[in-house]
Amino acid sequence: MNPSPEEARWHRFALALRKILMVVVLSPLLARADYTTTINPQTTWGIWEGWGNSLCWWANVFGTRDDLADIVFTTNYTAFNGVSLPGLGMNIARYNAGACSWNSINAETMQASPNIPAFRQIEGYWQDWFSADPTTGSWNWTVDANQRSMLLKAKARGVNLFELFSNSPMWWMCYNHNPSGSDAGTSDNLQSWNDNQHAIYLATIAQYANDHWGITFDSVEAFNEPSAAWWNSNGAQEGSHFDVGTQAAVIGYLRSELDNRGLTNVNVAASDETSYDDARTTWIKLPSATLSQIGRLNVHGYQYGGGRRDLLYAAVVGKRLWNSEYGESDASGVSLASNLNLDFRWLHPTAWCYWQAFDSGGWGLIQSNPGDNWIGPPNPKYYVLAHYTRHIRPGMTIIDGGEGNTVAAYQPATRKLVIVTMNYGTAQTITYDLANCYKAAGPVRRWTTVTGLGAKYVQSSGPIVNNKALQSFFSINTIQTLEIQNVDLNPPPQINISRITANGEFELTWPDTASGYNLYSTASLINPAAWQLMTNTPASSNGDYHLLLPASGGSQRFFRLSNP
């Protein structure tokens, strides 16, 4: 998130540390000459769920703008500030439950930090403690209209995963009534007697959204970087510290409150820690009963080139895992690509979310100062991220790209292999070895972005696949996407004759994992043109397709499965 003065000092330290760590992480790659990477489809890391963006704070200002919704949530090209921008096609929207209100409750009022900009104050729906009934005057469902407007625009554009998250409990639930944090920043600000109230607040919003907005949240996250010590009463945004014990209590209450409202399919996500190492520490400390109530682990990517992503992945194996927030001030996109590739290589999330699409100081994908209602040009990092979001799409299988700078994904339905590679400080030719694929024919399409001056997401003719290999030349600090058509990762499944009936009918059986294959038949192997597509619809049971065919009358018949 955009840092307060205290956070800025921490981020400067983190960035400096990252530069040191980059020597370890990237230096061996910078010195490399031309090299070969071998795509390994036998190693997979899950089905990709998608790409996302938080709606606070930019949607609090720009939430009524259709052009911005098109840019973030579609893959259409949109005319914007004199350029035609390729839409990012994000399919995840993270909606922030606000913590502010300006009403008086028995002469008590919100205490606002002197450093929080107005556009970062998100007004909350539960405005006093008198009633938990959402139909009473304690609740105001007309507030936060702009962010809610963008939420609905996102849904209208095909977004299919929604998360409700909280930066702070409502101000009146806090010890000091300040939704930016406790006075010191190192202690819980949620009053202990309001642990359940915080859960009720979030569960009620989830239910109201389902019933009145047509939004079904996939998950609810009650915390934001809860172990951090920088959420204090002088902070520049809403925030709150939560000890691990408090987290466990709120998670339990939240699971119960969601269930009580019939939202049993809505996941509890936790804990949105700022770093991979903090996330692992919190995960290990949470009781096993609490872990069973968490449907997905969320982590932020602010440890950049540091942190043991691999140990976090191992600790939570079996749970869904998202990088739910990432951002930095490098407008070029080099840092974004480096850290995103590290996530794919070691963290293995199934979704990845950027923090602020519109922000200042290089943090935004598009330069913007929401406080002044100003939006400027896209940063190069916008185009860098487009290489991932527009080509690695939901439903694809993430496979091993062979080395740390390359991400690969496969779409079975279209038999398309996608390869995204970031090249750093040396111009070089990279060879992609596809020998581990059963078939790789092409053609190939290529997109290129130079992070400095030069091409920005420009499509060109791709290299030719020759003997299951292809080459592409990269200038320095350049990212390329290659889409290779007509790729089969594995040989067609085997067809078996499972039974022959008394009257000579016979049954063909093959695995139902071969859903993308068609069945062909011929009486002659000599003439390739004699193969005919069979239009019979097979039955499916016990993991297999079954097709009963009439007796062949003594003549030979041959069958094969083939991709369209």
Image (cartoon, rainbow, N blue to C red):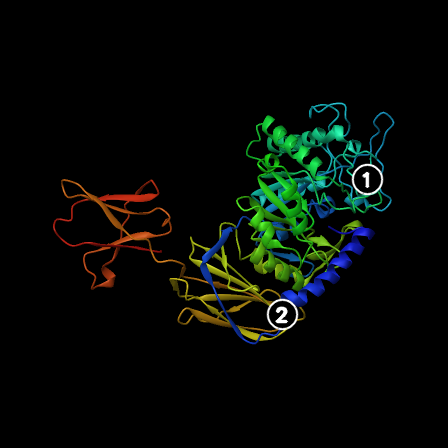
Q: How many marks?
A: 2
Please, what is the three-letter code of the amino acid marked with disc 1?
A: Ser
Residue 88 at least partly seen: no
- How far apart are the alpha carbons under marks 1 and 2? 43 Å
Q: Are marks 1 and 2 in contact (CB under 8 Å)?
A: no
Front: mark 1 or 2: 1
Residue 539 at least partly seen: yes
Relative height, residue 311 to residue 143 (above, below): below
Helix or strand or loop: what does disc 2 sit on?
loop
Residue at (59, 29) in percent of width and height: 259
Residue 229 location (% of width, % of height): 78, 46
Disc 1 crowd, CA 10 A, few/some/many (<14, 14-19, 20+): many
Q: Quadrant of residue 335?
A: bottom right
Tell me the tag on residue 182: 1
Residue 440 location (% of width, % of height): 40, 64
Please, what is the three-letter code of the amino acid marked with disc 2?
A: Tyr
Tell me the tag on residue 372: none
From the viewer's side, name the closer residue of 196 and 258. 196
Q: Outermost residue, left direction? A: 554
From the viewer's side, name the closer residue of 21 and 445. 21
> Nearer the N terminus, badge 1 or badge 2?
1
Relative to residue 460, is residue 366 drawn left or right?
right
From the viewer's side, name the closer residue of 494 and 379. 494
Residue 396 location (% of width, % of height): 49, 52
Split into 4 quadrants, where in the image is the C terminus? bottom left
Relative height, residue 446 to residue 264 (above, below): below
Residue 7 location (% of width, % of height): 79, 52
Residue marked by disc 2: 424
Disc 2 crowd, CA 10 A, few/some/many (<14, 14-19, 20+): many
Residue at (60, 59) in percent of width and height: 342
Helix or strand or loop: what does disc 1 sit on?
loop
Q: Quadrant of residue 368?
A: bottom right
